[in-house]
Amino acid sequence: RQVYGVSGSGKTFFLNRMIAAAERDGSFGPLHRFIIVDVKHEGYADLVEELDGTADDAIETIQKNRTSVVHADIEFAQQDIDEIIDYLFHTAERVEGFSATLVIEESSTFIPPTRVPPSIKRLATQGRSLGLSLILANQRALSNKWTDTQSTSLTLFRLAIPDRKLLKDRWGLDADVLDDKLSTKKFSFAHYDLEKLGLRFFEPIPEKKPSKGRKRKAGRIGHKFKSFVKM
């Protein structure tokens, strides 16, 4: 899965709310883990109390907590990702019921146009059978064509103008019409199914956190995230 959106368009907020709702909802199994690698070091402070700085810290946290955020140093971030992915495969192969969702923010930092790190390739191609899923989040549309062959969907917030031609050339999407529609409501987004070639628009995720008496609404959001991950 790929999630695109310029700064301030709602991309990180969307992932925050979806993961938080999925944690409460129970749509995922009790051993499911959410891991976010975030080199920009912002946007997930409301999701977890303690933000981890290295892969070793994150792996220790993954063992205990539902959600972990790795504020990786840019110089060592790829090594952190490699170690986390190795741990996820090792655990999924040995612990019944274990599954995980890895979100890589600013994914273009690790995936240039002509190369994909072996660990990310492994997760994208072999992870699904073990219950491991990958979400690539970025401000700009990734220009690496290999990621297109492994992706089943795009979640699109407002895009940078240079990316609009890319969407047209690669997927036949009229990005100008798309952006006009998304600009009418802050944090609204579109979902494009790369297998069925279907485009759907969605209302913004509510900014206000659900009260304790409104768990049913949070459950619907959590269920949507489960569907989103498994698409």
Image (tube, rainbow, N blue to C red):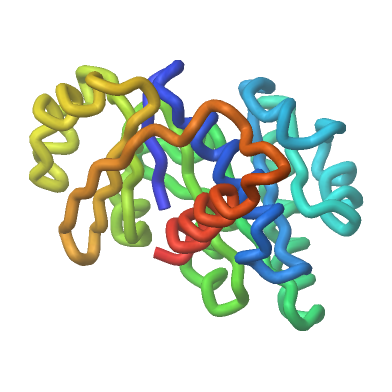
Spot occupied by residue 81 in the image (x, y as percentages of width and height):
67, 46
Residue at image coords 54%, 39%: 15
Q: How many marks?
A: 0
Spot occupied by residue 181 in the image (x, y as percentages of width and height):
18, 27
62 on left or right of 175: right
* Residue closest to the eye, 78 or 31: 31
* Residue closest to the eye, 95 or 66: 66
Q: Compared to 98, does 190 lie above or below?
A: above
**Residue 123 visible in the picture:** yes
Quarter of the C terminus within the rendering: bottom left
* Residue closest to the eye, 116 or 142: 142
**Residue 76 visible in the picture:** no
189 on left or right of 84: left
Residue at image coords 78%, 53%: 66
Q: Residue furthest front?
A: 213
Spot occupied by residue 63 in the image (x, y as percentages of width and height):
87, 58
Residue at image coords 73%, 78%: 97
Spot occupied by residue 103 in the image (x, y as percentages of width and height):
58, 46
164 on left or right of 204: left
Q: Compared to 99, does 213 lie above or below?
A: above
Residue at image coords 91%, 51%: 60
